Image (tube, helix red, strand yellow):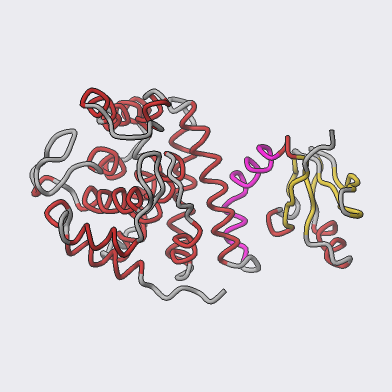
């Protein structure tokens, strides 16, 4: 059986870096030859030689996909700072790195490297949104409609960071905290049964009670690690609190819900409503926002919601 080959664009490789996977040239459809072996440097000379021969794409075997994704995560800062890479491509690279990181963390959330790895992705998310104005629009366009915990966490982080910027948060450290909190806000779900997370149909009262424990479970995981800042923890702790005082896990009154908690609540619900889930079809963004500003208006900070609407209406870049 022939191996599956996956394309790797040259702009997804960092010049003068060591690759730990095989890179192949496609000589004709379905035929490949080895270009560079693992643990060898991919140099500027290699890059220039490929371009001189009109080669924009190399290939790797499917069973080495994870190695390449980890390579992107390690070199994410360099890739996103490269002025020769277009913003849409940077968004793709950021999303790949975030997904690799979060999938690993959801498997082993108590690993000592969980928070530092996620923080690095959060930092790059903030820098890209702040540095390149059109990045948020590209991110919103790229976000998949189907729901799972990893995609949802990435989306909430992006929406929360964008809303914080729109709301006037300028401190870089605060923005990094809200991005990190968004990425890790559902980390407690890693301790819940998988069949509960993906269950079609409504939860029973007992199942809902168990599902709601994901907030305090997430707090416990991150408090044990000890490297989560207080503002990032607010996102984890308060993303299900509501201005009605009927949220969970603490049913906080409005005056006790932090700005970051209010931002997280809007971002979390909006993404859940506009994603296909096991028990409901995705709503159109305009319908979700209308519902949040009418029937559910008492749940959310309406001034922030209006800022959110404006941020989503930012001019989209032309294709």
For the point 48% across and 38% down, the residue is: 102
Q: Is residue 79 magenta?
A: yes
Percent position (x, y) of residue 74?
61, 44
Quarter in which the C terminus is drawn: bottom right
Percent position (x, y) of residue 219?
29, 31
For the point 54% across and 53% down, the residue is: 94
Q: Tell which of 116 and 72 is nearer to you.
A: 72
- Which residues, given as a range, are shown in magenta? 65-82
Quarter in which the N terminus is drawn: top right
Q: Is residue 281 left or right of residue 113?
A: left
Q: Is residue 67 magenta?
A: yes
Percent position (x, y) of residue 307?
26, 67
Percent position (x, y) of residue 245?
9, 43
The answer to which quarter of the image holds residue 89 is: bottom right
- Indicate whether 233 appears above or below 271: above
What's the magenta bit mostly, secondary-structure-wise?
helix
Q: Is residue 41 left or right of residue 229?
A: right
- Indicate whether 187 appears above or below 298: above
For the point 39% across and 43% down, the residue is: 277
- Indicate whether 150 appears above or below 270: above
């Amino acid at each position: 059986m022939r191996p599956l080959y996956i394309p790797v664009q040259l702009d997804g490789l960092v010049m003068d870096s060591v690759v730990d996977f095989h890179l192949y040239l496609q000589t004709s459809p379905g035929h490949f030859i080895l270009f560079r072996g693992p643990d060898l440097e991919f140099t500027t000379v290699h890059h220039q030689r490929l371009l001189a021969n009109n080669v924009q794409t190399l290939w790797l075997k499917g069973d080495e996909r994870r190695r390449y994704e980890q390579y992107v995560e390690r070199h994410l800062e360099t890739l996103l700072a490269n002025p020769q890479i277009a913003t849409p491509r940077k968004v793709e690279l950021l999303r790949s790195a975030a997904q690799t990181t979060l999938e690993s963390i959801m498997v082993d959330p108590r690993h000592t490297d969980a928070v530092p790895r996620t923080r690095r992705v959060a930092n790059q998310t903030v820098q890209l949104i702040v540095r390149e104005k059109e990045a948020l629009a590209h991110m919103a366009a790229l976000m998949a409609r189907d729901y799972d915990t990893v995609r949802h966490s990435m989306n909430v982080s992006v929406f929360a960071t964008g809303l914080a910027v729109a709301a006037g948060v300028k401190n870089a450290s605060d923005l990094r905290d809200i991005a990190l909190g968004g990425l890790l806000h559902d980390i407690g779900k890693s301790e819940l049964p998988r069949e509960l997370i993906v269950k079609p149909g409504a939860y029973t009262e007992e199942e809902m009670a168990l599902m709601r424990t994901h907030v305090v479970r997430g707090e416990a995981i991150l408090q044990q690690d000890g490297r989560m800042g207080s503002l990032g923890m607010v996102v984890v702790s308060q993303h299900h609190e509501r201005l009605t005082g009927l949220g969970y896990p603490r049913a906080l009154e409005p005056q006790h819900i932090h700005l970051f908690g209010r931002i997280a609540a809007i971002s979390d619900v909006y993404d859940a409503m506009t994603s296909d889930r096991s028990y409901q079809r995705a709503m159109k963004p305009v319908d979700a926002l209308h519902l949040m500003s009418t029937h559910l208006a008492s749940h959310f900070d309406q001034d922030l919601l209006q800022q959110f609407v404006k941020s989503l209406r930012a001019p989209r870049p032309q294709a």
